[in-house]
Image (spheres, rainbow, N blue to C red):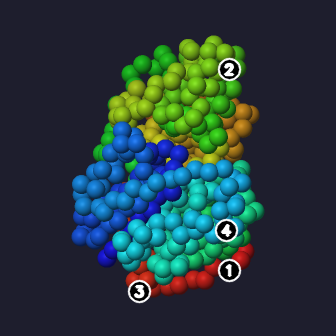
């Protein structure tokens, strides 16, 4: 079959949202299918190596150029129907039996779906993250709604995200499929427990992006005198998502150098977890955080907020600690519960490792590749119409 992939990723060269579709694409290539990929062009030195690997594996790679204009101009172009059929030439070249559109964030532009509908090309949508704090602008509502209504199938990485989209586009998306994300650690990973417990080390593994990952809340918690007096250190691992400068200035402003340390991007996850006792991730919203999955696979219990798939994968007070929401008070309370049971962290991490292997797919890329093939018209066994909620 001929399968196309289109990623809406625009803000960064690569991210966790790109792992599932790209790995599924590789699986399809290995099985002899045609794979066409449409991705935003960047300066050569900033191109993601994962895309070049796909190209070497046989993917037909197309780099699209992105032109950014202001909101007012964009509205005017929309009214004039200018630029309303993006990637038309590429779609005619790739001729996919199905186009899989990976959506990094629920507000991303989906105008390519209009091109698909005009050409009669079926498409499916994969949503990687949806925030309950940001809404579609009124002038985009009908177009975005049509994009979801016209999809052959919709995929989400958490039911919570599906509910956010249902509200945003006022459609019944109960026929959507919840699919698991891939991870970067070996299934046999068993990092040794850190030998030094004179300092309890928590790793916050996430790009430095306050709006989603909420490291700002973590800094507020650690500013308290009770945490300053304890032998605990939070190590922040992740690339700059836009707030690194603020993070460093806040650490300096509140003299938190002893208790909060920025470590940069982590290349070796196994090594990281051999040096830390637990994960802390105070996210305001998530799809299905890869960092949490990887920490649990490595036998480290998570201290997290109730976002994405957390409630399905983490048992509060058993295999981790869950704050009901990303607020200063609730995160402090979850961390306090964790601290009082710090001598149980290793045993809780072992429970987390066993649970995640039972509750989460161990072959997510293959699962998604198979789901894509089953979504091709003629391969489906059931069809369900989406009605307004």
Q: Earlier in the sequence, mark 3 or mark 4?
A: 4
Q: Quadrant of residue 342?
A: top right
Image quadrant where residue 4 sits: bottom left
Along the horizontal axis of the image, is 27 left or right of 132? left
Q: Is residue 291 above or below residue 113?
A: above
Foreground disc of the pair 2, 1: 1
* Residue sitting nearer the eye, 290 or 41: 41
Q: Which residue is mark 2?
A: 223
Q: CA distance from mark 3 to mark 4?
A: 36 Å
Picture coordinates of residue 165, whole percent (x, y):
65, 63
Residue under the image location 67 percent in, 16 percent down: 254
Q: Which residue sits at x=70%, y=20%?
A: 224
Residue located at (54% from left, 52% from top): 67
User: Pointer 2: residues within 10 angstroms few (<14), some, or many (20+)?
Assistant: some
x, y (%) of residue 368? 40, 65
Q: Earlier in the sequence, mark 2 or mark 1?
A: 2
Mark 2–mark 1 CB contact (< 8 Å): no
In the rendered image, which residue does mark 4 sit on?
80
Packing grade of label 1 (10 A; few <14, some 14-19, many >=20) is few
**338 up-or-down from 233: above or below:** below
Residue on which disc 1 sits:
387
Callout 1 secondary element:
loop
| Residue matched to label 3 | 378
Question: What is the distance, in whole Å, between disc 2 and disc 1 at their CAs?
Answer: 49 Å
Q: CA distance from mark 1 to mark 4?
A: 29 Å
Spatial distance from mark 3 to mark 2, Cα to Cα? 59 Å
Image coordinates for residue 184, horizontal then vertical, percent: 37, 45
From the viewer's side, name the closer residue of 315 and 46. Answer: 46
């Amino acid at each position: 079959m001929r399968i196309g992939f289109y990623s809406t990723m625009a803000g960064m060269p690569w991210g966790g949202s790109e792992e599932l579709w790209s790995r599924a694409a590789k699986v399809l290539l290995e099985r002899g299918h045609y794979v066409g990929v449409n991705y935003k062009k960047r300066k050569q030195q900033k191109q993601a190596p994962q895309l070049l690997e796909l190209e070497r594996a046989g993917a037909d790679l197309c780099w699209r150029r992105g032109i950014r204009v202001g909101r007012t101009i964009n509205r005017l172009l929309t009214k004039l129907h200018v630029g309303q059929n993006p990637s038309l030439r590429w779609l005619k070249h790739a001729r996919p039996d199905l186009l899989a559109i990976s959506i990094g964030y629920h507000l991303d532009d989906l105008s390519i779906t209009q091109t698909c509908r005009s050409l009669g090309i079926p498409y499916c949508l994969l949503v990687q993250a949806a925030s309950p704090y940001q809404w579609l602008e009124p002038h985009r509502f009908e177009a975005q709604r049509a994009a979801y209504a016209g999809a052959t199938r919709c995929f989400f990485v958490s039911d919570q995200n599906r509910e956010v989209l249902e509200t945003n586009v006022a459609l019944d998306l109960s026929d959507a499929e919840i699919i698991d994300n891939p991870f970067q650690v070996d299934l046999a990973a068993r990092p040794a427990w850190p030998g030094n417990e004179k300092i309890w080390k928590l790793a916050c593994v996430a790009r430095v992006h306050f709006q989603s990952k909420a490291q700002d809340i973590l800094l507020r918690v650690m500013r308290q005198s009770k945490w300053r007096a304890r032998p605990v250190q939070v190590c922040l691992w992740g690339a700059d998502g836009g707030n690194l400068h603020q993070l460093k200035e806040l650490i300096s402003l509140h003299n938190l150098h002893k208790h909060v340390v920025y470590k940069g991007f982590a290349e070796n996850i196994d090594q990281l977890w051999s040096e830390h006792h637990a994960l802390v991730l105070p996210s305001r919203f998530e799809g299905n955080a890869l960092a949490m999955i990887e920490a649990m696979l490595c036998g480290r219990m998570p201290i997290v907020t109730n976002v994405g798939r957390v409630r399905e994968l983490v048992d509060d007070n058993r295999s981790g600690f869950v704050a009901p929401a990303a607020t200063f008070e609730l995160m402090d309370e979850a961390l306090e519960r964790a601290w009082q049971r710090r001598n149980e962290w290793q045993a809780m991490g072992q429970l987390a490792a066993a649970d995640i292997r039972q509750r989460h797919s161990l072959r997510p890329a293959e699962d998604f590749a198979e789901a894509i093939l089953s979504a091709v018209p003629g391969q489906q066994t059931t069809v369900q119409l989406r009605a307004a909620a």
